[in-house]
Image (cartoon, grey):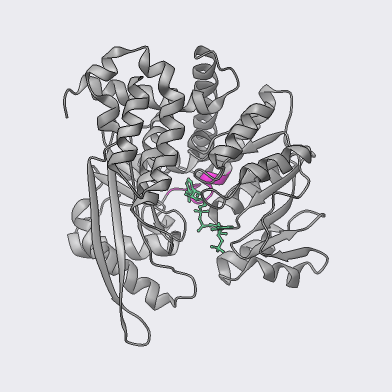
Amino acid sequence: MSYTKKILEQAIAKNPHEPEFHQVMTEILSTLQPFVDSRPEYEKAGILERLTEPERVIMFRIPWVDDAGKMQVNKGYRVQFNSAIGPYKGGLRFHPSVCLSIVKFLGFEQIFKNSLTGQPIGGGKGGSDFDPKGKSEREVMAFCQSFMTELFRHIGANTDVPAGDIGVGGREIGFMYGQYRRLTNNIEGVLTGKGLAYGGSFVRAEATGYGLVYLVDEMLRHNGESFEGKTVIVSGSGNVAISATEKVQQLGGNVVAMSDSNGRIYDADGIDLDAVKEIKEVNRGRISDYKNYRPNAEYTEGKNVWDIKCDIALPCATQNELSGEDAKTLIRNGCFAVGEGANMPATLEAVEVFLKSKMMFAPGKAANAGGVATSSLEMSQNFMRTSWTFEKVDRKLKGIMADIYNNIATAAKEADCEGNFIVGANIAGFKKVADAMLQQGTV
Ligand code: NDP
């Protein structure tokens, strides 16, 4: 049996009841097989055994008091997966579905993504099963302060630098940063996604969505296409979905659909993004409220966006939101390019359908790396005690996404899998981390 297959089986057996972690390991290790098996030094040094085991897993209790005066307790996690090339870096997710399997899947994926950015950052991820939806401002603050009261002892500007993810935006980062500063008496760039008034970077809020569109645009251009005049569907209506929609519209594409976990909107005239921003960012409302702004738009409860006819699809909500059947529907309707804004939004079956169809497919590991890349730029600015302009950060982000595209396209070609950016991204991301681990000995 090949080394990769053996370690994949072992890792699955050693981590039972963690389906999302199994899924991401299967995707990554199976595509790495020919590359890793042709280099016996990796097996000799036990690289895969080490890579699939987090350096450290921290789990903790988060007690807080709700507005009714009742004690609530949530679970907290930080998985510090791999620091071979830099401090652990990766977001915090607050969502009721958060569990060890999801945090490990995201942390494992993050190792390769961060490596692909070309920045010196390792992989980590964290979060809680706390649900910010429907909570008052005071409850969210009480929770964030309690979360940081445990987490602060495990992180630091040179150790582990968390950021946002689902359910964690500027508001939550602000509350956590304030508590960190109070507990440590230390002003440092310990979190990214901070407000501009206290060490944040221009473009960080937009970076994942903008970066996604920059990378997909690069992929389209290499195939004689562009966003101009194309019909685009976007799932989700959070941070990534909103900024992706904004950039597509700037490049002349027509985004006709968005969604949330309750349903989807379809607006043939093109999504009114100001309306979506007001609903989601100001009122913290539901996407169904869009009908109040654009009565001619359609809202469908309980439905995702994948059966809407489009040229380009950008899944930007959550993992496993796009099934094999959805993938077939997209292709039947003429969709010719997919870029993953979310982490692992397409199931293994959906990815197989895309690859077989030879459509253009940009995997999340590469396509949504603009967020963490800009977080790394925020860290650089914090260390230098400076602040770059919007234009400067945006230019750097664009350059990073173009480099990522070139690296994954070249790695795919070298592996005799031209156009298969999953193989390209996995090999390009893996090689740097594995070589750093080899050079650092048995740590
Ligand atoms: P947000 O919390 O800002 O938004 C998430 C959006 O997805 C919301 O509109 C949410 O709707 C929707 N959603 C969640 N679950 C479902 C579901 N089951 N079906 C349909 N819609 C759903 O998160 P982000 O935009 O930050 O993150 C989105 C994705 O992008 C995640 O996979 C995240 O890991 C990934 N990502 C984020 C980065 C970042 O910088 N923020 C960086 C790289 C990747 P509702 O409000 O109803 O829950």
Where is residue 246? Give x, y as percent: 65, 49
Magenta range: 201-209
Q: Quadrant of the N terminus?
A: top left
Answer above or below: position of 364 versus 69: above
Answer above or below: position of 280 versus 374: below
- Determine whether, in the image, residue 9 is placed left or right of residue 207: left
Answer above or below: position of 160 versus 291: above
**Residue 134 highlighted magenta (yes or no):** no
- Determine the residue located farthest toward the left in the rendered image: 442
Q: Quadrant of the C terminus?
A: top left
Frontmost residue, 248 versus 266: 266
Quadrant position of residue 340: top right
Where is residue 186? Give x, y as percent: 20, 56
Where is residue 138? Give x, y as percent: 38, 77
Frontmost residue, 135 versus 121: 135
- Determine the residue located farthest toward the bottom in the rendered image: 68
Question: Which residue lies at the image location 32% right of the left edge and 21% below the top edge?
Answer: 3
Evaluate whether residue 163 shows in this view. yes
- Determine the residue located farthest toward the front in the rendered image: 1
Question: Which residue lies at the image location 43% right of the left edge and 64% below the top edge?
Answer: 96
Quadrant position of residue 323: top right
Evaluate whether residue 120 shows in this view. no
- Determine whether, in the image, residue 306 is placed left or right of residue 296: left
- Determine whether, in the image, residue 291 is placed left or right of residue 324: right
Answer above or below: position of 69 versus 125: below
